[in-house]
Amino acid sequence: MYDPQPTASHYVNGAYLEDTSGTPIPVIYPATGEVIATVYAATPAVIDAALAAAEAAQKLWAKVSPRERGRVLTRAAQIMRERNHDLSVLETRDTGKPLQETLVADATSGADALEYFGGIAAGLTGEHIPLGEDWVYTIREALGVCVGIGAWNYPTQIACWKGAPALACGNAMVFKPSETTPLCALKIAEILTEAGAPAGLFNVVQGMGEVGSALVTDPRVAKVSLTGSVPTGRKVYAAAAEQMKHVTMELGGKSPLVIFDDADLDNAVSGAINGNFYSSGQVCSNGTRVFVQKGIKEAFLARLAERLKNAVIGDPLDEATSFGPMVSERQMQIVQGYINKGRAEGARLISGGGRVERDGFFLEPTVFADVTDDMTIAREEIFGPVMAVLDFDTEAEAIARANATEFGLSAGVFTRDLSRAHRVIGQLRAGSCFINSYNDAPVEAPFGGVKASGVGRENSKAALDHWSQLKSVYVRMGDVEAAF
């Protein structure tokens, strides 16, 4: 009997699993502050069971033809689309994001990933390299058991962005969601089983840092893929390197959005809104340093303030709501701290800046102008609805200042001069870039950062290189010569 809610804390070996001896983790609905569920952190026994199940399933799954693996993923995508409403409601209850948003951006995006990698699984081939009479051929092989560690802002999408290419390549996965948003990944595991994945192929275990550490350091694990903050990424990367594990790190950013005088004003404002206030600003690729050329600075700020009045702040389960709460009280307090620093360091508050007078963890969409490069709000990732507007004179200045950061996840340019658009993007040191747009993330395109923002790429054909390894086989047709 189908149940729209997960029925236990963990999903191991093809079934829900409960073990209440682990640390209880309350699941709090961000719109009200109410506890809507409780899950329990994985005990060592649960972790071991998940890894053992994954190891056994992977050996069988790797022998399944890529075409059949693709069919399972494609069936899972179809089930997700059929249940999009229920999955979107669960995402909203898990994260607080408005249903208006989750209906089109979360389970749908996860289904896109399953469908995409399901579709290209049969194309996982090697190559023939002729060497005269001899030749070399390559075989693309699975890595083995992989660990995925998710962030709290896109729990459904991240589970699929990691699980889909991993499974397409013949791997098994143990996925640990963020303890803040533990519910959604459980339904992905359930759907994969329903679609025909072998028991143990995709497991979900709950927990905090110690559970993640136990997974990352287990010798049965061949690869770790993390979505999270840069400090967490450094720790996980170092732990994985100790045992020479494969890694993908999708980390944070402080991305620049450069708006030139000749940009279409409303499009530029829309891009800045999407790059700062979608998901209440809780997006790693957000363009939170908005560089506006001086000629249109005041017109941009005026139009932005006017547009922000249209934000509908309210019950996230009401489809009319377009702006929801922070994911947690702690995250709200962190963002409030940055707003206070912005004021204290002399930035000009254009809009917002306060907490919304209602239950839950709501902050107003906040815009600071006259921000300088040395201000805290221009240097550190805030992960909340706070836009820093900086002004500039010349193209060269904008490029130099945009690149003056340890991060390099995303970057965007708004201009009607397409030569300049390509020229500037070509000089911005970031992995996922946009021209006259912001924050589009189709599964067909690689996603990931440079510098401190991560290593490896998610999505697209590029992801296959990060979830598989190549074996080379030299074939000699004649006699073997030797020195003696």
Image: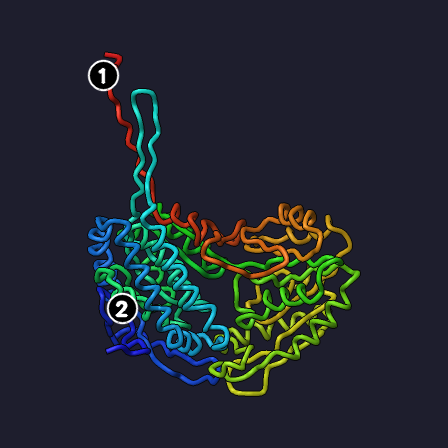
Locate residue 422, reporting x and y percent.
64, 48
Say left or right for 170 vs 251. left
Extreme residue in the bottom direction = 358
In the image, which disc is placed on residue 479?
Answer: 1
Locate residue 255, reporting x and y percent.
60, 58
- Residue 310 is drawn in which quadrant? bottom right
Q: State which quarter of the image contains the N terminus.
A: bottom left
Residue at 22% of width from left, 51% of height from top?
64
Q: Amino acid at mark 1?
A: Asp
Res 330 seen here: no
Say left or right for 39 vs 52. right
Q: CA distance from mark 2 to mark 1?
A: 55 Å
Q: Going from the N terminus, do you reach mark 2 or mark 1 first?
A: 2
Res 28 seen here: yes
* Residue to which mark 2 is pinned: 11
- Residue 459 is drawn in which quadrant? bottom left
Circles 2 and 1: CB atoms closer than 8 Å:
no
Residue at 47% of width from left, 82% of height from top?
317
Extreme residue in the top direction = 484
Q: Residues within 10 Å of mark 1 (few under 14, many from 20)?
A: few
Residue at 66% of width from left, 79% of height from top?
309
Residue at 22% of width from left, 69% of height from top?
15
Q: Amino acid at mark 2?
A: Tyr
Look at the picture and state if 378 lies above or below 17. Answer: above
| Front position in the image: 420 or 366 | 420
Secondary structure type for disc 1: loop
Locate residue 170, reporting x and y percent.
28, 51
| Front position in the image: 38 or 159 | 159
- Total numbered circles: 2
Secondary structure type for disc 2: strand
